Amino acid sequence: MTDFERSLVKSFNRFFEKKKIRGIAYRRKQHRFSSQFVDILVDSFNPDFYLAIENKSLKTSSADKLYFSQHFSKTDEGHQVERINNFVHRSGRRGFLAVELRRGTGRPRKAYMIPWNEVMERYEKDEKGFSVENIKKFPEIKRNSTTYKVKQTMEMVK
């Protein structure tokens, strides 16, 4: 589990605890010969918080775009975007792509929450991916020093 994934899971669980919402965020254990559909699952009786979140991290000093061809995998079972879309559709979850922009030494990381339907729309139009500027147009996942705060982000994407 990456630091970004760990931080988001903790942030969701803190949010649920503080708001007294019945919900839990977790990362399924990945085994060597089995694939996971998404990085983070969030379960709740509240449909606003029944989520599937794929996480990507982008080093902005070496990449100006999150590419479908480079940053998502392709296997015998198909492209990762298609596999995630199938999982989101079949599970009834709300899907999101959380993108962390690592901006280099001395500059804080920033993360953004992109609704999965936006990802699919670009993918189906054969667009290459999301530029950093495109990513910044989506709701930011606020950060307090080293911890992400999902509260305001989840209110924006309801």
Image: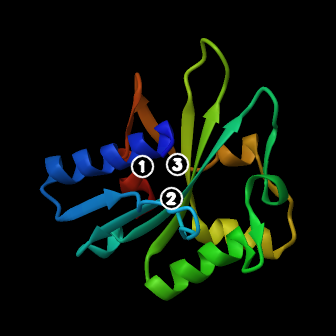
Rate crowding at label 1 as few (under 14), some (14 to 19) or many (20 or more) other CA atoms within 10 Å. some
- The three-letter code of the residue at mark 1 reads Thr
Q: Residue at x 46, y 72 (%)?
A: 94
- Chain-order first, disc 2 or disc 1: 2
For the residues carrying marks 2 and 1, which lies nearer the camera in this image? Answer: 2
Mark 3 touching mark 1, by CB under 8 A?
A: yes
Q: Amino acid at mark 2?
A: Asp
Above or below for 26 versus 121 = above
Counting from the top left corner in percent of width and height, residue 88 is at 52, 78
Residue occupied by mark 1: 153
Q: Residue furthest left?
A: 20
Dot placed on the residue nearer the N-terminal end, 3 or 2: 2
In the figure, 4 relative to 128: above or below?
above
Crowding around mark 3 (Cα neighbors within 10 Å: few <14, some 14 to 19, many 20+) is some
Q: Position of residue 78 (x, y in %)?
A: 75, 78
Q: Name the residue furthest bottom.
A: 90
